[in-house]
Amino acid sequence: MSEQGQSCCAGAGRLVAWVLAAVIGVGVLVPAGMWFWASLSDRRDRSHAAAVHEAAGDQAFAAGDYARAMTAYTYARDMTPTPGLARKFVRARLSLGSVRPDLLARWDREDLEYQRAFLVDQDPGTTAVSEVLAGHLKRLAGDLEAAKERYKAALAADAGSMGAHLGLGLVAYRSGKTDEAKTELETFLKGFPDHREAAMALSDIRLGAGDADGAIDLLNRLLALGPDAEVHHGLGLAYQRKNKTREAAAHFQTAVQLNPNARESHMALGNLYLDAGLYALAESSFRAALNLAQDEAGRTGLARSLNGQKRYDEAQQALAPVLRSGNAGPMALLTAAEAAEGLGRKDDAARIYDDLLKFLEKLEGRADPKAIQALKGRVQEGLARVRAPAGAAPPAPRP
């Protein structure tokens, strides 16, 4: 081949090589470039979204909505996991536990202790939260004095620690120091007005102090959050204190509808029906309570409702296990005496009335004097009936 032909072939080869290189370059470099720019754009988008979620978490945390803060930090952490976000998530979780001690029983204890130590090491400003959590754990274990000391330590580290006010309020409430509990719980509820445990405790304190309206206000605030059998029970007690029987009965009825195992509500409803003379309805409520647990109060309530229906023999049967125990309370003995009287067994009734009168005299000075006097009055009425002269027609015993 001539020199000119060889040159042409070489040129053609170089052209083919350049074409192949261009094709390869386009096939490899263009997708790589596209991937690079898409990846860069995705990182930028993820970083922006993470910043938005982190800002939302910071805002929720500042407002005391720690559960929402945890959710926001989780989204931010999933997009751009950083040590700072990890700390913020732990801080939000432990802050939630400081105002929701009911959650701690469900959390892993070792994990909780590790996070407490980790957070204080990373941020000494969280010492108060750590102390509050330690106090809650002591309180849940029944060591109220130790819990109180940790709450005080939390307040020393941060005078505005709401979890410490909650803890001190609950310790005082469990200890029967209602004035102290009231002050602490009212302080806490200013920051967390919908807190169930604190509001329930404070409503009970207010009701005990005769402030039924104050209790109702707190409980209605909780009820606005959703149906709650315990809240309805509390409202029933409050309206009962105000002598609003219809409203009280409605709330007790709602409580047992929401929770058929709400024994206290069945009992309260039964006693309400007894006071209203609705003995058949009272019987139904007490039987429902006894299906959940057998005790003297339930059996006495049932017997009283049976006495009201003149079913004295059944009343005695209901009370038989209580009387056999040998330590029946005053109301059970009074109900047994009235059942015996209703059956015409005057000697038995008189003996029980006499024994009950002696028992009540021993209780004087150790029990509510008004309650003792009311019971003594009923016993004396019973004795007057069973010892009335032949031919007299004394009134029947009242349940």
Image (cartoon, rainbow, N blue to C red):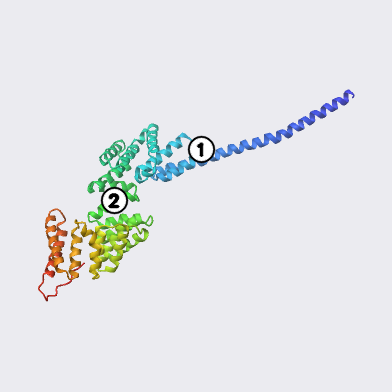
Q: Amino acid at mark 2?
A: Ala
For this view, does 389 lie left or right of residue 193?
left
**Residue linked to disc 2:** 201
Circles 2 and 1: CB distance less than 8 Å?
no
Q: Residue furthest right?
A: 2
**Residue linked to disc 1:** 80
For this view, does 103 lie left or right of residue 156?
right
Residue 98 in which image quadrant: top left
Vertical position of residue 393 compared to residue 184: above or below: below
Distance from the alpha carbon under mark 2 to that under mark 1: 42 Å
The quadrant of the picture occupied by the N terminus is top right
Q: Are there few (<14), some (14-19), or many (20+) residues within 10 Å of tag 2?
A: many
Vertical position of residue 204 compared to residue 70: above or below: below
The residue sitting at 14% across, 53% down in the picture is 366
> Element under label 2?
helix
> Element under label 1?
loop
Of residues 302 and 208, which is closer to you in this image?
Answer: 302
Camera-near label (2 vs 1) is 2
Vertical position of residue 190 compared to residue 317: above or below: above
Q: Which mark is residue 375?
A: none
Residue 64 in which image quadrant: top left
Q: Percent from the top left, x then y, of residue 48?
A: 52, 40
Q: Are there few (<14), some (14-19), or many (20+) residues within 10 Å of tag 1?
A: some
Q: Is residue 242 visible?
A: no
Of residues 174 and 280, which is closer to you in this image?
Answer: 280
Q: Percent from the top left, x then y, of residue 316?
A: 22, 65
Q: Percent from the top left, x then y, of residue 188?
A: 31, 46
Q: Earlier in the sequence, mark 2 or mark 1?
A: 1
Q: Amino acid at mark 1?
A: Thr
Q: Percent from the top left, x then y, of residue 202?
A: 28, 51
Vertical position of residue 252 compared to residue 18: above or below: below
